[in-house]
């Protein structure tokens, strides 16, 4: 496949350095297969979502895609989470539980999905406007996506975690958004969440060193108001403290000798 040509000049042996797992070529290839499942889920959800659907309908679609690929969901049962995916609407930032809530025209919906193949996870999120929304809402979604792209560009060997957070924060705050601090990106592999944490704020040249063979998730969450958050009574759903709208994008990527390889990209991304 074109996107993986020339990315690995050597087969790095899996090791752990300072609590951070360095994956082998074969392990990253397996995570790419999990990433293809995640991409298929995202595409199915984006193709299907419409006003009048219940959020549990999206969960059922994701479950069926995972089963069709003979994979397993990353989220279901994780610390007791009851569903296959997270569905968060409007002022909900992350970890919304699918159920009987009906998606309405003008909602913005964030969908966070994960899949396991042969014991390895991949994880991704996307936000979409359902129907027509105000221009500033479209800009929130697009700028959150762009902030992710900027973070990904910093995920190169020799940089540090703070370079990623700085890129996201510098861009997002210049657009007037609150950058969520309490919830961050993360390493990923045999566990859904591994070291290191990947904050969406940071200082250039600070934090853990990025090395070839690391696999991480970058996931900016931008709010139209304050960066502060609160958790609802279900102990899962995280919302903006001021009720403002929020958007969330995430990709799983491997750090290679030739730069970042996004494992969960949709076709054409």
Image (cartoon, grey):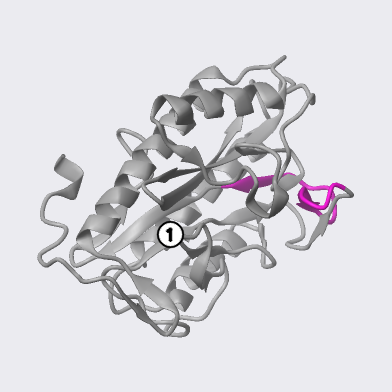
Q: Is residue 117 above or below residue 215?
A: above
Q: Is residue 265 above or below residue 98?
A: below
Q: Residues within 10 Å of mark 1 (few under 14, many from 20)?
A: some
Q: Position of residue 86 (x, y in %)?
A: 65, 40
Residue at point 78%, 63% (across, down): 228
Give whichever of 17, 58 is nearer the camera.
Answer: 17
In the visual, does 173 lie left or right of 72? right
Residue indicated by mark 1: 190
Residue at point 77%, 44% (across, down): 91
Q: Is residue 252 above or below residue 138?
A: below
Q: Position of residue 84 (x, y in %)?
A: 60, 37
Give whichever of 213, 198 is nearer the camera.
Answer: 213
Please say whether residue 130 is visible from this viewpoint: no
Does the magenta segment cover residue 136? Answer: no
**Magenta residues (range):** 234-248
In the visual, does 147 lie left or right of 261? right
Prevailing SS of the magenta stretch: loop
Q: Position of residue 165 (x, y in %)?
A: 51, 70
Give whichever of 206, 96 is nearer the camera.
Answer: 96
């Amino acid at each position: 496949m074109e996107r993986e040509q020339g990315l690995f000049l050597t087969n790095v042996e899996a090791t752990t350095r300072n609590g951070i797992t360095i994956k082998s070529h074969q392990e990253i290839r397996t995570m790419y297969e999990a990433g293809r499942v995640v991409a298929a889920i995202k595409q199915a959800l984006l193709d299907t979502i419409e006003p009048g659907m219940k959020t549990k309908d999206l969960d059922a679609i994701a479950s069926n895609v995972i089963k069709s690929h003979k994979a397993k969901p990353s989220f279901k049962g994780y610390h007791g989470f009851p569903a296959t995916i997270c569905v968060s609407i409007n002022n909900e930032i992350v970890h919304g539980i699918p159920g009987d809530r009906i998606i309405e025209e003008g909602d913005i919906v964030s969908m966070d999905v994960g899949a396991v193949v042969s014991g390895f996870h991949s994880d991704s999120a996307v936000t979409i406007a359902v129907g027509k929304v105000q221009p500033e809402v479209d800009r929130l979604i697009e700028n959150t996506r762009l902030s992710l792209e900027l973070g990904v560009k910093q995920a190169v060997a020799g940089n540090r975690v703070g370079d990623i957070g700085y890129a996201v924060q510098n861009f997002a705050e210049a657009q007037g958004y609150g950058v969520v601090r309490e919830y961050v990106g993360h390493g990923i592999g045999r566990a859904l969440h591994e070291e290191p944490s990947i904050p969406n704020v940071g200082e250039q040249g600070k934090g853990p060193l990025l090395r070839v063979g690391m696999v991480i998730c970058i996931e900016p969450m931008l709010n139209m108001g304050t960066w502060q958050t609160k958790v609802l009574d279900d102990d899962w759903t995280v919302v903006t403290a001021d009720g403002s709208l929020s958007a969330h994008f995430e990709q799983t990527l491997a750090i290679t000798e030739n730069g970042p390889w996004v494992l969960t990209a949709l076709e054409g991304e």
